Amino acid sequence: MAEFLRQVAKGELSFAPEDVRRLSTLQLPEERLLDLLDPAVCSDEGVTYDQLVGDDTNITRALAQHTSAKGRVIGLRAPSAAMQGAITFVIFGAHLQQVVLTEEHTVRIVDYLDPPPGSRQR
């Protein structure tokens, strides 16, 4: 949701007030994730924190392609570029069968937006 909201704020995406998104809770084997929150892992992979959270997605996309092709991990755990302090999980499509959906619900996008300045919250 954070990346979606970042793109809305930048004017790259739009939505209607009635639009919804599906949020899911997943169970996955943590030991099969490449942990890019660990500086030593980032060093081994040749990436920096600033590259992971920067606007240029070419570096992170190349890292994901390279890592996925190796087949030893099913995804990535990384700092979020969309929301400072948040964590992003990336699951490679070829490994989705190793992930268990534990909860799913639909949310209205407008519930995740900041109210306009000066407006009253309910």
Image (tube, rainbow, N blue to C red):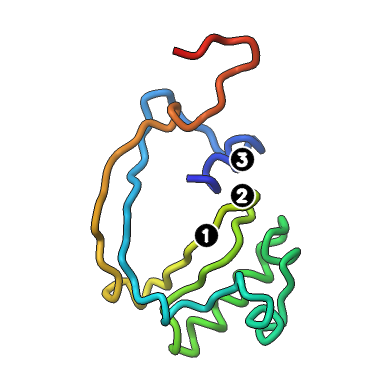
Residue 12 is marked as 3
Residue 82 is marked as 2
> What amino acid is found at the position of numbered circle 2 in the picture?
Ala
Q: Tell me residue 3's x, y (percent).
A: 55, 48
> What amino acid is found at the position of numbered circle 1 in the picture?
Thr
Q: Nearer the viewer, residue 85 or 44?
A: 85
Identify the mark nearer the N-term, 3 or 1. 3
Reply above or below: 16 against 93: above
Residue 5 is marked as none
Reply above or below: 65 against 61: below
Q: Tell me residue 51's x, y (percent).
A: 73, 66
Q: From the viewer's perspective, is 41 left or right of 14?
A: right
Between the C-alphas of marks 1 and 2, the distance is 9 Å
**How busy is the neighbourhood of tag 1: few (under 14 within 10 Å), some, or many (20 plus)?**
some
Residue located 55% across and 39% down the image = 5
Identify the element where label 1 is drawn: strand
**How busy is the neighbourhood of tag 3: few (under 14 within 10 Å), some, or many (20 plus)?**
few
Identify the element where label 2 is drawn: loop
Of circles 3 and 1, the one toward us is 1
Residue located 29% across and 39% down the image = 106
Identify the element where label 3 is drawn: loop
> What amino acid is found at the position of numbered circle 3 in the picture?
Glu
Between the C-alphas of marks 2 and 3, the distance is 13 Å
Identify the mark nearer the N-term, 2 or 3. 3
Of circles 2 and 3, the one toward us is 2
Check contact, mark 2 vs mark 3: CB within 8 A: no
Residue placed under numbered mark 1 in the picture: 88
Residue located 57% across and 53% down the image = 86
Q: In which quarter of the image is residue 80?
A: bottom right
Residue located 44% across and 88% down the image = 71
Check contact, mark 1 vs mark 2: CB within 8 A: yes
